[in-house]
Image (cartoon, helix red, strand yellow):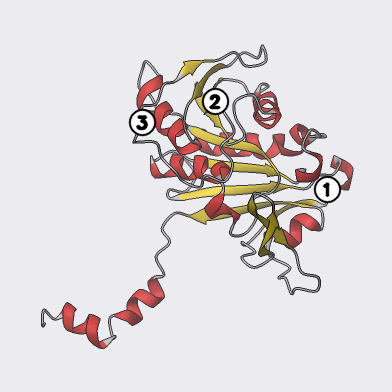
């Protein structure tokens, strides 16, 4: 039986993770577990809890036929706890889905996102991971027909996980436009759009708040996730967890100081 783990960064009572679970319930020969933060942990990146103890607690989950725990930690903590602590048979999940996040996680958001860290942590532990985010930041209570939109992708990833066909060391980052199904143009592979917004700090009485600006006329590649989502596509980006620039690594062997060290000279 396929073991599916769900997590998120919006908290165990968020609507997005409920929609994610509901979209998976029609899978045959699958068991679904939820391990999610007890409170919202958006923007925590890949933070881990090790200066205080984790305390998983069984949690009701909308009356759905899943077993759920809430954890006083971050998404990466939730995946670690599931893989090391919570399953009596100690069998790890076959696949981890993280989300559905309120708002997109595009481009460099993957480094800040707790949603993405849930999928990334799964891959670090040798389990396929998929992060899902929905472009409803300005309508956070409206999840539209997101379940219908993502169900084919979820089923495809589950089938590939069951057949051990998903690549190691890669998590998949999915972003979904806030559109009805008939207006979605399709599903597209996408690169990360690393420069589609600029940081901005707004000064208020209590201090400075970090916000964003999306400059008009900024050149974007047609293959970038930001461009594709804004033009009505569901995007799927494979993100390798090995961030080594291997072409530069080879060039660095010719740097004088590094070359000397490689030859054992001082």
Residue 241 image point, x, y percent:
44, 54
- On the image, numbered disc 1 is attached to which residue? 184
Which is closer to the viewer, label 1 or label 2? 2
Please identify the quarter of the rendering in which residue 192 is found: bottom right
- Secondary structure beneath label 2: loop
Q: Relative to 229, is 63 on the left or the right?
A: left
Above-or-below relation of 244 to 239:
below
- On the image, numbered disc 2 is attached to which residue? 38
Residue extending furthest toward the front: 205
Residue 164 image point, x, y percent:
46, 39
Residue 163 appears anywhere in the view: no
Residue drawn at (43%, 48%), measured in percent from left and top? 168
Give the quadrant of the C terminus: bottom left
- On the image, numbered disc 3 is attached to which residue? 52
Q: Relative to 16, is 44 on the left or the right?
A: left
- Secondary structure beneath label 1: loop
Residue drawn at (51%, 39%), measured in percent from left and top? 118
């Amino acid at each position: 039986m396929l073991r599916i783990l769900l997590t998120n960064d919006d908290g165990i009572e968020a609507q997005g993770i409920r929609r994610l679970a509901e979209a998976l319930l029609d899978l045959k020969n699958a068991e679904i577990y939820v391990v999610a933060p007890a409170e919202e942990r958006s923007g925590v990146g890949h933070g881990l809890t090790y200066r205080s103890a984790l305390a998983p607690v069984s949690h009701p989950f909308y009356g759905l036929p899943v077993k759920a725990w809430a954890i006083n930690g971050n998404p990466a903590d939730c995946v670690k706890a599931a893989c090391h602590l919570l399953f009596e048979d100690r069998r790890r999940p076959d696949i981890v889905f993280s989300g559905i996040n309120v708002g997109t996680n595009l481009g460099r958001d993957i480094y800040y996102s707790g949603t993405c860290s849930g999928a990334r942590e799964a891959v670090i532990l040798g389990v396929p991971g998929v992060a899902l985010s929905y472009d409803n930041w300005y309508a956070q209570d409206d999840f539209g027909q997101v379940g219908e939109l993502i169900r084919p992708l979820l089923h495809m990833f589950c089938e590939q996980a069951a057949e051990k066909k998903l690549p190691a060391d890669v998590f998949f980052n999915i972003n979904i436009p806030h559109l009805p199904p008939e207006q979605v143009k399709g599903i597209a592979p996408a690169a990360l759009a690393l420069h589609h917004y600029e940081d901005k700090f707004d000064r208020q009485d209590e201090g400075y708040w970090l916000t964003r600006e999306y400059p008009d006329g900024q050149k974007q590649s047609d293959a970038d996730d930001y461009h594709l989502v804004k033009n009505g596509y569901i995007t799927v980006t494979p993100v390798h967890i090995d961030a080594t620039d291997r072409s530069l690594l080879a060039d660095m062997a010719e740097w004088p100081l590094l070359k000397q060290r490689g030859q054992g000279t001082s």
